[in-house]
């Protein structure tokens, strides 16, 4: 049987759905109707494909990390080079699609939330591309950690609003963006950056990001000789992971492994590993695994990577975990930092800290596997944005 999730109400098994204030029900219905109308529309798809090729620079290549593979011994490590996209990450794939939809819906204003800043930069970029005003909400702690991306957003003409409430990170930025949308629902389109939120966002963002995995399915037989044995990707909200996982879900021979931020350790209480340590609840409009206490209050999270510092995960990942189709593991800050440095020194590639979590898992796995095993890692973004964080943790003043 072919993979047919979500259902008509946005459910992936018991996960997903739409749990929102009544003031957003009409907006979400309009969005669902518009997406259902345009997702298979030939002209929409033609324009989307044109933008991906001529503006984003797709297809992004797959790359054999040959020196690293030889040094580790064992499996062959390959990267999907999303870091080579315009704006430096996978986020732009989704932002282009949602911006094209916003224009067709007659929306004049764009808003977004961002953690590491890559989604904010991608949103500001497409807003500039189409001449639309843009407001990006960002936790004040992430504003501090990602100063270069904040400046990029401002250069692109966006207004960046620091959020001082709560933990001052991605969760709180998303809360503020939701409040803005409720207030300006008639003229504003909310570009959510990950596969979370109320239906249809988890499905819509996934569909726009599957360009990653669809390209891999064509590229790996040509460049590596066959499909990979393992596909690895970091998981915060989960868009880069679902983008590469989804086209492989029905290929039983390919093992899917998502890597969460274990922070200072899964037992430390300072991590962002909702699939490994969370319980089922409702946050930001969908039912999924969350980090919450016995009273249902969202718990503080921690990761060296701003893009993984979120107390929930997309509902499709929750279903993939529960169904056993994907496995989810944790990588600590220290392991991600080591992988970041090794990737720079050995392959000449500066990865995002998010991507470094997935790379670190490949480093763990490769020596235990045979030399004809293939591990494909989604290198979801480049690490320019993280240099100040890495330098700070390395005791270096820039």
Image (cartoon, rainbow, N blue to C red):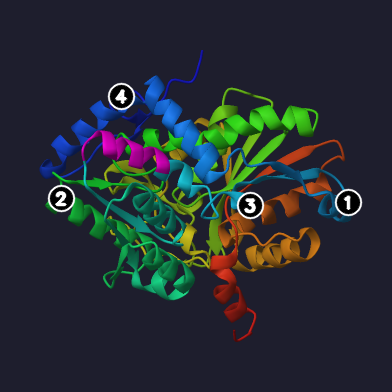
Instruction: Categorize mark 4 by other alpha carbons within 10 Å: few (<14), some (14-19), many (20+).
Output: few
Task: Please name the residue that numbered disc 1 is placed on.
Answer: 70
Q: Secondary structure at mark 4?
A: helix
> Disc 2 to disc 1, how far (Cα)?
54 Å
Q: Residue at x 28, y 39 (%)?
A: 102
Residue 248: % across, % down: 60, 28
Label 4 vs label 3, nearer the camera: 4
Closer to the chain start, of discs 3 and 1, is: 1
Instruction: Categorize mark 3 by other alpha carbons within 10 Å: few (<14), some (14-19), many (20+).
Output: many
Closer to the chain start, of discs 3 and 2, is: 2
Instruction: Categorize mark 2 by other alpha carbons within 10 Å: few (<14), some (14-19), many (20+).
Output: some
**Quarter assignment of residue 345:** bottom right
Residue 124 - label: none
Magenta portion: prevailing SS class = helix
Residue 358 - label: 3
Range of residues picked out in magenta: 96-106
Q: Residue at x 54, y 58 (%)?
A: 261
In depth, the one of 309 and 223 nearer the eye is 223
């Amino acid at each position: 049987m072919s993979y047919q999730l979500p259902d008509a109400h946005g459910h992936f098994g018991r996960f997903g759905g739409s749990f929102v204030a009544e003031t957003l029900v009409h907006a979400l219905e309009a969005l669902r109707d518009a997406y259902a109308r345009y997702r298979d529309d030939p002209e929409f798809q033609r324009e989307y494909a044109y933008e991906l090729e001529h503006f984003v620079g797709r297809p992004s290549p797959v790359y054999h990390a040959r020196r690293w593979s030889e040094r580790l011994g064992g499996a062959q490590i390959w990267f999907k080079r999303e870091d080579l996209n315009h704006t430096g990450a996978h986020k732009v794939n989704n932002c282009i699609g949602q911006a094209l939809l916003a224009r067709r819906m007659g929306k004049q204003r764009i808003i977004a939330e961002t953690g590491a800043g890559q989604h904010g930069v991608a949103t500001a970029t497409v807003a500039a591309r189409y001449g639309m005003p843009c407001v990006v909400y960002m936790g004040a702690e992430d504003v501090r950690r990602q100063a270069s991306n904040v400046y990029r957003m401002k250069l692109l003409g966006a207004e960046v609003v620091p959020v001082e409430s709560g933990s001052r990170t991605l969760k709180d930025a998303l809360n503020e963006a939701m409040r803005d949308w409720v207030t300006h629902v008639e003229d504003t389109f909310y570009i959510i950056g990950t596969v979370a939120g109320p239906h249809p966002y988890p499905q819509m963002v996934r569909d726009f990001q599957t360009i990653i995995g669809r390209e891999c399915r064509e590229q790996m037989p040509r460049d590596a000789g066959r499909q990979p044995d393992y596909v690895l990707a970091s998981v915060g909200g989960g868009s880069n992971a679902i983008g590469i996982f989804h086209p492989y879900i029905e290929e039983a021979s390919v093992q899917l492994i998502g890597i969460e931020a274990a922070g200072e350790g899964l037992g430390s209480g300072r991590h962002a590993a909702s699939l490994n340590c969370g319980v089922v609840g409702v946050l930001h409009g969908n039912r999924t695994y969350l980090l919450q206490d016995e009273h249902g209050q969202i718990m503080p999270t921690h990761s060296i990577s701003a893009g993984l510092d979120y107390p929930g995960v997309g509902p499709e990942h929750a279903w993939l975990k529960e169904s056993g189709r994907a496995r989810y593991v944790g990588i600590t800050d220290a392991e991600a930092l080591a992988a970041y440095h090794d990737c720079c020194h050995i392959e000449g590639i500066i990865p995002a800290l998010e991507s470094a979590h997935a790379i670190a898992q490949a480093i763990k796995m490769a020596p235990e596997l045979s030399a004809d095993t293939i591990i494909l890692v989604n290198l979801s973004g480049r690490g320019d944005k993280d240099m100040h964080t890495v330098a700070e943790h390395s005791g270096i003043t820039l």
